[in-house]
Image (cartoon, rainbow, N blue to C red):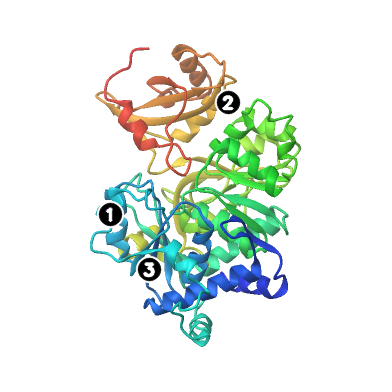
Amino acid sequence: MRSYGRIFDPVAAHAQQSPDAPALLGTDLGTLDYASFQALIEEHARQLLDLGVRPGDRVACLSHADWRVAVSFFATASIGGIWLGLNPRSTASELGYVLADAEPQFVMNNLLSGETSSGFAQATQGRAVISLRDIIAALGQPGASLSRHAAWVDRASSISADEPALIVYTSGSTGTPKGALIRHSGLSRLSQVQYAAHWGMTAGRTICNLPINHIAAIGDLLCVPLLAGGALLLLPQFDVEQIVKDIEHYRLNGLFQVPTQLQRISARPDFLETSALDSLEVVGWGGAPLPRESLDRWRQRGVRVGSTYGMTEATSSITYSDPGASDDVLLNTVGRPDPDLEVRFLGQSGWCRPAEGGEICIRHPTLMAGYWRRPEQTAEAFTPDGWFRTGDVGYIRPDGNLVISGRLKEMFKSGGYNVYPREIEQVLERHPAVQAATVVPRPDADFYEVGVAFVQLMPGGTLSPDEARQWCRTHLAGYKVPKAFRFTDQLPQLAIGKVDRAALRRQAGTADDPE
């Protein structure tokens, strides 16, 4: 089996082999080449050593996506620390929970003074907080307190690729958030497989604008291009107009976003005509299907399109759509399993054939190292022989592509039957008037639980509850048909761009809706 190394080694190699190649775009210092980027990493690593960071220590960083985040992350990893991203949009209680659980040595605050909220002050009360902006600004200046270079070299040489470099807290939508420990090797594998092997990009110029507390930001959007020698632009948030301007200005050729973001870009009135997007070669997404209308418009732009399926604990993607995949594959599957990753399906009576389906289980040495300080939950996440249980239910089609039927924890019981929301959502999304749909359960006196469908229509689309119900009855068994249909202009979303199912469950209520 192929081996994967430490995440900071490729960046150092690029600094030696291609020192003038652009690494970080649009920084306060202009474009940073790999030689400058590596110098900042090494100097910041020595700062962290002076601050007392030791192998296994956690270093938290409160920031939007920003070039200093890249320096902080690679510097921490290079001395054996475990980096933790904090989202400035999190509440005081959310930040407080993560900080109390991870117990970082200190928090690097990368926000401007006016951005730091009282909630952050409350969450960090009694903890050491250091300005990341100030400490990086001091790099290379006379009088800066730096250890000997040998200290950094000694520390870096002792780090194993199997050790964790990152801790990512799961969303907690179905329980208490857990900190998944992400290995160097997992992030390294993600870069090698995704950027070069799957997307076919060797000198990519891409963008990162997702919250830094998610694996998609640090893994897919930060590590992937920088480990591969590409260039990266980090932006604090998603803004349609700004992204289009940046694509044109920096000649970005890869755009990897959640479907909602791609959908909003493709909805621009001048999307098909503007020359601002001419540099784009590849557009990819994950986390949810891209609506058909948006897929059609991106295809009309002439770019290569593709999707992936993965999760925090897997680190790298589990599946990829084939180059040139059909609309059917992109709309109804998540692509083909990575051949380097072992995939099996677990049913109620044991392992199942891929065509029969069941819970998707995966095995590879680069999966997460476990949940931080949760040995029992780590053990529950794996089978006795080392297969990680994803919690997703699916099956392999005859063409080799994986279909996700739903999540075990999203499954609900209606009249004694197991109902998987994703199956119903896919049926609704095949209706020409429907842009997106989410199905959640609500309590019911007769059936224990019934489904409530929240439906986002296409612009100008019309659909009545009776028509939606009849459409579902045509394609689904009766017990799967939602009890109520609610139509909305926009489904609520989490910070990462996924649908906020918890919010919809709260809205679903307990009584029949007037229709």
Looking at the picture, how far across and down is residue 399, in whole percent? 68, 43
Counting residues from the start of the chain, the first of labels 3 and 2 encountered is 3
Amino acid residing under circle 2 = Arg
Amino acid residing under circle 1 = Ala
Q: CA distance from mark 3 to mark 2?
A: 46 Å
Seen from the viewer's position, the closer of residues 324 and 388 is 324
Looking at the picture, how far across and down is residue 261, in whole percent? 56, 38
- Tell me the quarter of the image containing the N terminus: bottom right
Instruction: Write down the residue under mark 2.
Output: 430
Which residue is at a point 24% across and 59% down the rendered structure image? 125
Label 1 crowd (10 A; few <14 / some 14-19 / many >=20): some
Helix, strand or loop at mark 1 = helix
- Residue 499 visible in the snapshot: yes
Which residue is at a point 61% across and 28% down the rendered structure image? 267
Where 32 falls versus 435 (above or below)? Answer: below
Q: Is residue 338 left or right of residue 473?
A: right
Instruction: Write down the residue under mark 3.
Output: 58
Looking at the picture, how far across and down is residue 253, in whole percent? 71, 48
